[in-house]
Structures are given as C-alpha cells and as structure tokens.
Image (spheres, coloured by chain):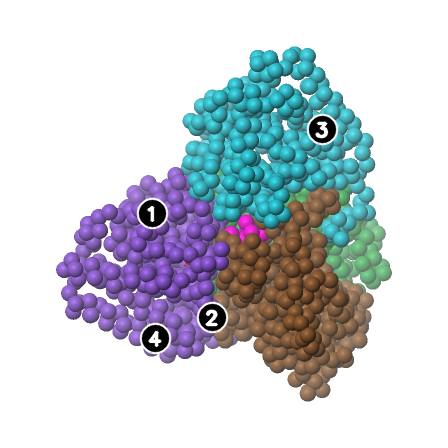
Chain colours: A cyan, B purple, C green, D brown
Amino acid sequence: MTSPSNHSPTGLDGSTAVSSAPAADLAALDDATVERALLRMYLIRKFEETAEASYMRGLVHGTMHLSIGQEASAVGTILALAPDDYILSTHRGHGHCIAKGGDVARMLAEFFGKETGYCRGRGGSMHIADVEGGNLGANGIVAGGLPIAVGVGMSIRMQRLPRVCMVFFGDGATNEGAFHEALNMASIWSLPIVFVCENNHYGMSMDVAKAMAVANVADRAAAYAMPGVVVDGNDLPAVAAAARAAVARARGGSGPTLIECKTYRIRGHSKSDRNLYRTKEEIDAWRSRDPIARFAGELLDAGRLDAAAHARIEAEAQAAIDAALEFAKSSPAPDPAMLTHDVYAT
Amino acid sequence: MTSPSNHSPTGLDGSTAVSSAPAADLAALDDATVERALLRMYLIRKFEETAEASYMRGLVHGTMHLSIGQEASAVGTILALAPDDYILSTHRGHGHCIAKGGDVARMLAEFFGKETGYCRGRGGSMHIADVEGGNLGANGIVAGGLPIAVGVGMSIRMQRLPRVCMVFFGDGATNEGAFHEALNMASIWSLPIVFVCENNHYGMSMDVAKAMAVANVADRAAAYAMPGVVVDGNDLPAVAAAARAAVARARGGSGPTLIECKTYRIRGHSKSDRNLYRTKEEIDAWRSRDPIARFAGELLDAGRLDAAAHARIEAEAQAAIDAALEFAKSSPAPDPAMLTHDVYAT
Amino acid sequence: MPSSTSAPSTATVATSAGPTGSAAPGSGAAAAAAPGTDTALRELSYAEAIREALAQAMSADPRVFLFGEDVGVYGGAFGVSGDLVHRFGTERVLDTPISELGIAGAAVGAALTGMRPVLELQFSDFVTLAMEQLVNQAAKIHFMFGGKANVPMVVRLPAGSGTGAAAQHSQSLEAWFAHVPGLKVVQPSTPHDAKGLLLAAIDDPNPVLVFEHKLLYKTKGHVPADAYRVPIGKAAVRRDGRDLTIVAGSVMVPRSLAAAERLAADGIDVEVIDLRSLRPLDSATIEASVSRTHRLLIVHEGVKTMGIGAEISARIAEGSAFDLLDAPIARLGGADTPIPYNPVLEKAAVPQEDDIVRAATRLVREGRA
Amino acid sequence: MPSSTSAPSTATVATSAGPTGSAAPGSGAAAAAAPGTDTALRELSYAEAIREALAQAMSADPRVFLFGEDVGVYGGAFGVSGDLVHRFGTERVLDTPISELGIAGAAVGAALTGMRPVLELQFSDFVTLAMEQLVNQAAKIHFMFGGKANVPMVVRLPAGSGTGAAAQHSQSLEAWFAHVPGLKVVQPSTPHDAKGLLLAAIDDPNPVLVFEHKLLYKTKGHVPADAYRVPIGKAAVRRDGRDLTIVAGSVMVPRSLAAAERLAADGIDVEVIDLRSLRPLDSATIEASVSRTHRLLIVHEGVKTMGIGAEISARIAEGSAFDLLDAPIARLGGADTPIPYNPVLEKAAVPQEDDIVRAATRLVREGRA
Ligand SMILES: Cc1ncc(C[n+]2csc(CCOP(=O)(O)OP(=O)(O)O)c2C)c(N)n1
Ligand SMILES: Cc1ncc(C[n+]2csc(CCOP(=O)(O)OP(=O)(O)O)c2C)c(N)n1
Ligand SMILES: [Mg+2]
Ligand SMILES: [Mg+2]
C-alpha cells in the first residue's frame, strides 16, 4: 500500500473523545488562564514560523521538527501543571518548552547555536532544555524520554515531593520497547506521571494505522491497567480538562494516566519531507481545524475575549518573537576553544 | 514487601482458562498422540533430573534452568506443530527441544560440553539448538527470541511456506521492550506466529503480580488487537487445544495469537536460588498438580491407557535418558585447537 | 597509481581501485544499469550507487529484501532507497514501525531461515537500541550453535557528523563493532565501494554492518554498471607516496586525499590508504605501506580514544614495521566530546583537512604530530 | 613497594595501595563497620566490600538507592546486595521488572532530579539492551544541555567469563564505554578498590560504569572499615619491577601478579600496574613505569581486537616513551571468538597465568612476545 491514507479529522478515527462537555471544559478555565493559553499558542505558532523562515534563509543549519497545528496539545496539557512540575519533551519540542514557560529568546538563540541559548549552542533544536523551568529536555531519540520519566517519578516519590512528571511522545514512539517498559514500571509503582501521546497520525511517513493494530494509542493503556484517555488534541479546553484529571490523579498518589491527543502535523516531518505519504486534501482538512483559530473563535463566541484583546495577545506574541529573533541573531557564538569543556560535570 | 506471596494453583489467579471442556480436549487427541505426549513429558522430567544430578555430582559446570513442573506447557503447545514448523526457545528450554523431537543424547552431550552435542559443546544448556528439527535455539537473553520470531514469520510469509513459528518466553520476559515490539509487528503484518508465554509466576525472584499490573499476560494481547488466551498450563489436553486453535489461525493466514500457560517452576530459578521469595506451601501446592501425574491419571481414568502401557512409556523414557547419559559421558570433548573456528561462516 | 585530487568533503572523488581494490566481476543481473552506457564515464552518487546495489541484489535473488523505517514511499531519510518500493513492492521494500531492537531481531530471524535481509537503521546512533540482537544474537549464533546455522544479514547505518544534527544523530560508533567477533564491518568512502561492498555484504554468510556517511551520499564517482563486488577485508591504496602513510576511513578519505594534494605542493609525498573494512582489518596493506614510508598517520571521525586508530596503531607497532618507524605513529580522531550543535564547534570536533595537513607536516618535518 | 604474592584467580589478593592509590579518608558514616575491628586485619570479600560501600553510601546520603533485577529478597544474582533490602527497605533496594532499557533510563531520570541511583545490571552482557540510555542520554545530557544538568548515576555490571555461562553471559564489553565521552569507567580488581571505587563513583557528578568481575566476588582482601574513596582515573602499581611493565585490569591483575612471582623465580622482575579506570585512562602512571622498564605487556580479558589494550598501546607508543621501548608493546586479550561453553575452550579463550608467563618471558628474552 503506497497510496496515502486519509485521516479525516472529523471522525477522530472513530474514537470517542473524553470530553462530551465542551462548554464546561471552557468554563473551567479562568480568564487569566485562557489568556495565557492563547498567548502561548500564538508564541508557539510564531516561534515555529520564525524558526522555519530562519532555516529557509540559511541562518541556521541542521534540521527542525515543527509543531504547527499541535499547539493545543502542548499548551492544554501543560496548563494543568504547576511551575515546579517536570516535563520531558521530544524532537518536536518547541511547543512544550514554550508552554512550560520557556523563554523564546533563549530558545531561538539555541536554535541559532548561540552561547546565550538554553544549551549554550551545544544542543540545538532537538535538545532544548530549561531545567530550572522544569523542562528536562527535548530528546532526539524517539521514546527516549519515556524511561527517563520513570526515574523522575521515582525521584519525586522518594523525595516525597508533591510534584508530577508529564512526558510527551508521538504515536510512532509507542511502538518502541521503551514505551512498554516505561508504562509498565510507572503503573506497578503507581508513579506520579502523566503520559501524553501526541498522535499526529504519522511517525515520519508511517501511518499510525499501519504501525499498530489498535484504533487508539490509548487502548494500549489496558496492558498496564492504566487509564487511557482519548482527547481531541486540537480542542484546547478538552485537552486541559483531560490533563487536569490526570495530573490530579498522579499528584494524589493514584498513579499514571495515558492521554492520547489526536492531532495533526501541518508541516512536513522535517525539512526533507516531500509529503509523499499523505494527500493535500487531508492536510487541508486538518488546516481547517486549526487549534488556535478554533480556541480564539470559541472565546469570542463565548464572550470570554473581545477582538481587541485577541489582537493585543497576538501582537504580544509577535513582539516577543521579534525580540527573540533579534536577541538570537545578535548573541555571541560559543568559543571554539571551549569545545571539550562541559563534557564532564565537576 | 519482602514477604513471599502465595500463588494458589487452584484459582489460576482468578483468570478463566480457555478450555471448559476437559473431556473434549482429551478426546481430540488420538492414541498415538497421547502416548507421544506422555513419553515426551517423561523424557523432559527425566532429562531435567539427570541434568540436575549431573550438575550436583560436578560433571558439568555453568548453570541450568530446569523446567520440572512445566512439561505440559512445552509438550502440549508443540503437539500442534508439524515437523517443519519452527520454534524459538528460552533459557529454560530443554523441554521445548525434547517436545519438538530433539535427541536427548545430543542434548545431554551439549550439556556436558561435548563435540557430539547439538552445538558441539560451544553453546551449552542455554543455547541448545536443533536447527534441522526446526528448533532455532534456546536463548540466554530474556525475550531475545521474540524479535527473531518476527523475522521467521516474515521469512515464512515471503517464501510462501505453509509453516508456523512458535516462540516461547516467560512471564518476566513480557516486561521487556522486545516483547512489545515483536507482538506489534507480528500483529500489523498478520504473521504466522504463536506466542507462548509460560507464566510460572516468577521471573527469577520477581513475582509476576509485582512485575505487571494486569492479572494475566494474555490481557496484554489487546494492545495489539491480537487474541489472548489463558490456559491451565499444567493441563496437557487444554494446552494442546489452545495451541491447535492458534496454530490453525496462524497457518490460515489470520495472524498471531498470544497463549498464556499458567504453570509453576518447581525447582529454583537456577542453581543459586535459595527460594527466599516464595513459600514451601506454595511449592507443595503446585507439586500436587504435577502435570505428568495429572495427565497419566486422566488417561488411566478415561481408559485411554492401562498401567502396563504407562509403565512401558516411563521405562522407555528412562532408557533413553540412561543411554543419553552414557553417550554424553563417553563422547569426546572439542579440540581446543579449534577454538576460533566456527566464528564465521564460510 | 595516484588518483586524481578531490576538493573537501562534498566534492567528487575519483575512484582509484588501487592494488588491492580490483573489482571482481559481479554475478547478479545488472537490472538497474542503463543499457549502452559507456561505463568509463558512468557516474553515480554514493546514494545512487547503494540503491543500484540494492536493486541488482533484489533482481538477482528473491531472498534479498530491504526494510527499515521510512524506506518505502518516503524513500529513506537520506533518499537512499528512493523509488525502490515502486520497483519491488511493499513486501520487499518494507516500512517498519519505530522499533529498532525488534527490526534488528527480525533481520536475524529472516536470515536464520533462508532470507537475505538488508536492514536500514535510520541513523547509526539508533544502533544503540539494537545492540542486543546484533551483538548477542547475530554475531554469536553461528558459533553458539556449533556452526550449524548462519545469519547472512546486512545492516546499513548512516553515520557521522557535519549535518547539524547534534549529539544524538552524529556519532561514529563503528569501532565498537570491530570489537565483536562474529560481525564484519565495512565503511565505504566512494560510490564505487558503496555499491561493491554492499553487494559483497549481501553475499556474505555472516552479519555485516555497513557504515555509510551522511556527507558522502551526494558525492559522485565512477560506478560500473555490472553487479561487481568489492571484497570485504581489503583496504585500498588511493594514492601512492613516499614520505608518509595516511590511513583513513569513510569521509576522512576524501579529506585526506585533498590534504595530500596540498602536502604535495609543499613537497611532502603522501600515500593514502582507504581502510574500507574495520573487521576484518587489513593490517597487511597498511604494514606494507608503512615499511616503505616509515611514518603513519591514522585519521578517523570516531572519538580518538578507543577509535579504530587505536587498534591500527597497536597492530602496526607490535608488528614487523616497528623497527622501521622513523616517528611515532600519530592518530587524528574525534575530540573527547559529544558532537556539538553549533556548526563551528561541530567542525572542530572532528578532523578537518587543515588538521590533516598540519599533523602530516609535523610528523614528516618534526618527527612527531 | 612490592605487594605480597597471590595464587591464581580465586586466591586472596593482598591490597597494596601503591604510589597512586592512597585512599582518601572517607566522609560517610561507616555504618556497616564492625566497631573495634582491627582494621589492619579486616578482610572482606569483593562482594562484601561492594555491599559495605552501598550500605555506607545509603546510610550517609538519603539520595542514594540501589535498584535492579533481583537485588531485593534474592540478594542479587551474585549475592552482592545480600541483606541490604532488610536493612534499607524495598524502596531503597528495589526489585525491578526485566526491563534493562527502562531501568537504565530510570536511573537517568532519578539522577537528573536530585537522586544518586545505583543500578545493578544482572550481567554486563545485558547492557546491550541499555546502550541507548547510557550512551545517548546519560553520557551526553550534561554537554547537550550546555552544562546545566548533571547525571550522577552509577551502573554496576558483573562481567567476564570463567563461570560456564557461555557466549551471552560472559562478555567483557568495558572497552566500548571507554570510547564514549561523558562516561567514566572503572574496573576494580580487589575488595579494597571495589569498595573505594564504588564510593567514588557514587560521589561523582557524572555517570560511572563499574565493571565488576564474577570470578572476583569471592576473593578476599583487606578492606578498611571507613568509607574511603579510591580516586577514579588513577592506576595503581601493585608490584615494582625493573624488566617489564605489565598493565592489567580486573581479574587479570591477580593473574598477572601470580605470573610475576613465577617470572621472578626465573629471574625476570616484573612491575604490575592495575589499570582500575578505563576512562579516564591513567596513561601517566603507565608511561612512568615503561620509562623505567622499557617493555610493556598489556593483559585484558576483553577481545584483543579493539580491547582497551589497543588504546594503551597506541598512547604509549605515540607518547614520550616511544624512544625508550626496547621491544614492541605486546598485548594479551580475549581470542577472536564468542566465549565457548566447554570449560577447556572457555579458558583458552582468555589469557591465563601461563599465557602471561609465556608472553612476558618472550618479551624480555627474545624482544618480542
Ligand atoms: C530511536 C529513533 N528512531 C528513529 C528516529 C528517527 N525519527 C525521528 S522522529 C521520527 C518519527 C517519530 O514519530 P512520532 O513518535 O509519531 O513523532 P512525530 O514526529 O510525529 O511528532 C523518526 C522515525 C529517532 N530519532 N529515534
Ligand atoms: C535481558 C536479560 N535480563 C536478565 C536476565 C537474567 N535472567 C535470566 S532468566 C531470568 C528470569 C526470567 O523470567 P521469566 O521470563 O519469567 O522466565 P522463567 O525463568 O520464569 O522461565 C532473568 C532475570 C537475562 N538472561 N536476560
Ligand atoms: Mg507522529
Ligand atoms: Mg517466569
């Protein structure tokens, strides 16, 4: 089967989303929270667009994995976390970092390989970490963060901290052995972990429907006697509601939850992607469910936001990214003489 | 929790065995088959006892993993296979090899490290393979055979052969990532594989109830949209019935099945085991469900075997093992000058 | 037989088969060869050469198949498999889930039962997930089973730095596998060898790891149309010289050849040996060269400490060339660091042409690198 | 400062700290020390010494915990953890499922967030399943994150052959990790160092791999009661000598010391250096010795090709000792084969005392091993 499949967004592949009460989900978020959520979604979108444009203009090298279209998943889940909770992110991790409160200037500086970047130019896009902010890092290895999350959960438990660890991964990552081992250990030890699968329907070119035999990644939670929750990943209030429940469960000592956010990656997997495995129609159908436009629309409809405030938020995001770009460009590069410093901690 | 748990054999941990028709399961086996099954069970038991005694007398070095108490699982499943079907075995693999028709003399010679052994003394207990007989080898790596089975299944499929691959593993192995990756691939590609989990309730000292959160290993099959079957692993006809169904399904192109044989390891995990993690009562309770005595008893009760035939079969097994021991002892050791031969195929 | 020169890393490298590198005539059908092509002029890229080898092997032998992540319609992360799925179908060019341990084991199982699998690992760094199957199973089964089973499988591993992919996507781990009896390890540096070594690897009854270099995929060179083999275990002299032997592998070969031209202009006459195979290691070719030049510089991208240069240095020093050395053997290898993201640091982390020129000059002029 | 002799592999090895091995006074509470013991006579086995180090570290620091397969009530596959679970409870001596990749990653996560995990892998061979987390994550996080996070974790790995456990349970893979910047690798040969190096490893802010040897677990030696540290990165001279330097690690140290006694009776005076750390490698101590003895024999159990001896040989030959060598450096290492099951073949596959005596004699008498 080399023909691209069609993942219609409307049916969510026949699965039922957890939230059947969209109004209640939105009502559960206070005004400050909805503004913060919208701002962060815009920050992510504009960050990704700026990263892409910088790449196209040859300002950065390497590769990048953009999360355009997946903003509600990153922001909605992390809304449920406290500042000292932990996250572990993925190769497609810019959104998680911003959602957790990361500084877009230090992120973009990292993308530009600068000494002022989060990783002082050593890590780049795939390794951005904001350890002080609770972001224990993006990861270049698919499913690489999952076993690490188990250790973070153990650490929280042994230190008797009221924290939670939220770990992100894609649909493709759920076929790695690491996924299985991690979910099993988290479950038998009732660790305070929230597993968030961002199912964007493809692992690179591999259709999730060809890569696994079950309809939902969340169905796999049963193998660990863990709650598995499917949520419309482009619906911010719904994602936030699912995450709140899972975080409360984890913090309360009742153990981990697997949340599956059904969403879609609008851009190619990385720069080398020619989109041979999917149709333009499929991409367009998902484009029409843009999570930012949708959330903003709901807020306007519900009278929770007016057009002026919306414009102000978008402009604030744009200004932050513009400043970040300036910062990134003008920051100094690392000193090559320092090449082998920071290999070992002292 | 350092106190040993108690796995009562009667309740099978609350799970329901697949077979609710014991009489029919037995009736499904013809006379030649029941005799063969009983003979092979006795061969296994006596092989293991002889291996153990040889070890105790210092005739062999290394370690060994005995399957005493698990004979019905090995013999019952493999009864469903044709001679050119494949098996992949485990560190606790003597029973599988014998059940597949392996020569006990060449097995014992291998255990003694002799040139006449299946592996010419290079492999030992943990690596006995009878490639010509369709036994692709025991494996020293827990879950090591599972990914290999996927390749065997692919090979069968691509060569358009009517064969099946049956792969064995323990309960402990199901927590390895390899288990997950293998079952997933077998399922998405509908490969002709039968996965047989011999759940003897412990992975070394680790209680299966502590190592996973679900009641049955078979419950994990759901994560792969694969049938999962729990069977009383000490009930030979029931095991055989479950295996026949799974083999037929695989051979018919309908894909893999996960069979879980609930059983018990009567001996320690290996020579170094002091049984600190389980009670004498538990061991005794399972001893009373000895699969060989039970099957022989059923046969006698059902009039399928008389005492004389029973005695003849047991004696035949004993004679074969005695001859094997003689063969093993008197066989030549490998020539040390050949040390680095057979590292590469030519 | 000096080969023509080459510019730094991405330039065309002319293929000089060299004394030990004469290509054996291939046996398989040259399915992908353009008929009537003048083979003397026939140029392919390294990626195209690999694809041609795969196509020829699959056409000639129904047991051969390719599988891995995104090798199908995507055409491979580096475009190597390209259109093969359209030519051979999805069964023989099979996309897999992201399960490196599982697919490595699947290769073992298929090889054990009569197939000739070729597995692509998307980046060689991910071999860290497949070590169990490669090292404990593939490498040992023939021996552990007393010689009664073979595991004729090939693993292709895109390796190396220089693409800005940072520490987890830029490693050069090939030296590990040279430590594992039962495996063979090759590392082609030219389109010619990329094809010929891959075909030889597919023929081989043992597991063979083929380390390809990401920076070489687009380099072009002469590739004959027939299904020739390049023998595993034979190094190739790429350039003759009197003053110094440079042994290099993979992308370090074009860099060393470029350095050699600059050194020639400075009056230093360098012999360049392309290692090609790491296991078995062709010490004889190196030793013969060193007996003539009396000086040895080894260049590789993998971390210097415990890189393949350590073994080469140790072997040459303990062999008959010991008494003939006019200077201590020198090694250039990767710095003692993960590969950094920043492009300037990234370049500084592995030997570049300038480093080779500098080390070679010192070794010849000052007797020490 | 010649140490006392020792019989072959399983005999008691007297601990001679040697010039570079002076133990630093420890800081932790000596929880497990028998009060009032005369420390000069205090003997423990290698396994007991490790257990004592774990107990002292756990008593002194609540961040330290031990986990792995069967480390709890079973007491560890080789009895190393013994009764620790009864002393520290099941949270700090934690049995895990059989999930090597997962538990290695768990160590990374715990270390990243303030704990000091000590992970036991049941056999070092199973590290093949954990390479991803150790090599891509643990080793690189500090660097990839620009120095802003540490991964202070310890992995204990029982290694080596000699127990009849065959090819998948007998490997010596430590050389691989010496190739990985970001990791530290140690390999104690005595009970004294087994304790001191483990305590140093637990203190270290970096990931440290401790390769223990199965044949050494029952060997006895002097172990002070206090929580002393043996510095990582320092070799120890175990025996002074004039004619030849033998560098050995792990179980090859007692074998080399025994060989040295036999050689002494034959008039050959051997200096024996215990490598102790593979990364960082203490070339200085080796170089200093070789400058005095002018001959070097390296002995290790891991496969000779690409074993740690290759790096040592290369470093010494390219260093200042090059001109001082009276004979080529020689290496004894594992044969080019998986470890066989048959006990005679198994012994033949790795260096034994006789092999060391033979190689040393030839090197000194004939100038070539
Ligand atoms: C272990 C490993 N295998 C393969 C890759 C190459 N790779 C990077 S991202 C990716 C697809 C991942 O798919 P998914 O988990 O669904 O995440 P997505 O990219 O869709 O966000 C692949 C195959 C990798 N980085 N790590
Ligand atoms: C990858 C790996 N991890 C650990 C071991 C050590 N080990 C050998 S058998 C065993 C227990 C296996 O349990 P299970 O799968 O239930 O099989 P059983 O021994 O009960 O038959 C362990 C931990 C191993 N051989 N391989
Ligand atoms: Mg995806
Ligand atoms: Mg078990």
**Which quadrant of the rendered structure holds the C terminus of chain D?**
bottom right
Residue B62 numbered mark, or none: 2
Disc 3 to disc 1, C-alpha distance: 59 Å
> Does dot 1 land on a helix, a strand or a loop?
loop
**Which quadrant of the rendered structure holds the N terminus of chain D?**
bottom right
Q: Say which residue label 4 marks.
A: B325
Does D178 sit above or below residue A291?
A: below
Residue B140, position in %: x, y? 46, 60
Disc 4 to disc 2, C-alpha distance: 18 Å
Task: Work out whether residue D229 can be spotted.
Answer: yes
Q: Say which residue label 1 marks.
A: B15
Specify the segment rendered in magenta. D99-104
Mark closer to the chain start, 4 or 2: 2
Front of the two marks 2 and 3 = 2
Residue C286, position in %: x, y? 68, 62
Q: Residue at x 74, y 22 (%)?
A: A319
Residue D215, position in %: x, y? 57, 71
> Does dot 4 land on a helix, a strand or a loop?
helix
- Relative placement, left or right, of C362 versus B77 is right
Chain for mark 3? A
Q: Residue at x 68, y 12 (%)?
A: A308
Q: Do the numbered discs 4 and 3 sit on residues whose CB atoms are within 8 Å?
A: no
Front of the two marks 1 and 2 = 1
Q: Say which residue label 3 marks.
A: A54
Q: Quadrant of residue D173?
A: bottom right
Mark closer to the chain start, 1 or 4: 1
Q: Residues within 10 Å of mark 1 (few under 14, many from 20)?
A: some
Front of the two marks 4 and 2 = 2
Disc 4 to disc 3, C-alpha distance: 75 Å
**Residue type, label 1:** Ser
- Examine the structure image and report whether residue D19 is included in the region drawn in magenta: no
Front of the two marks 4 and 3 = 4
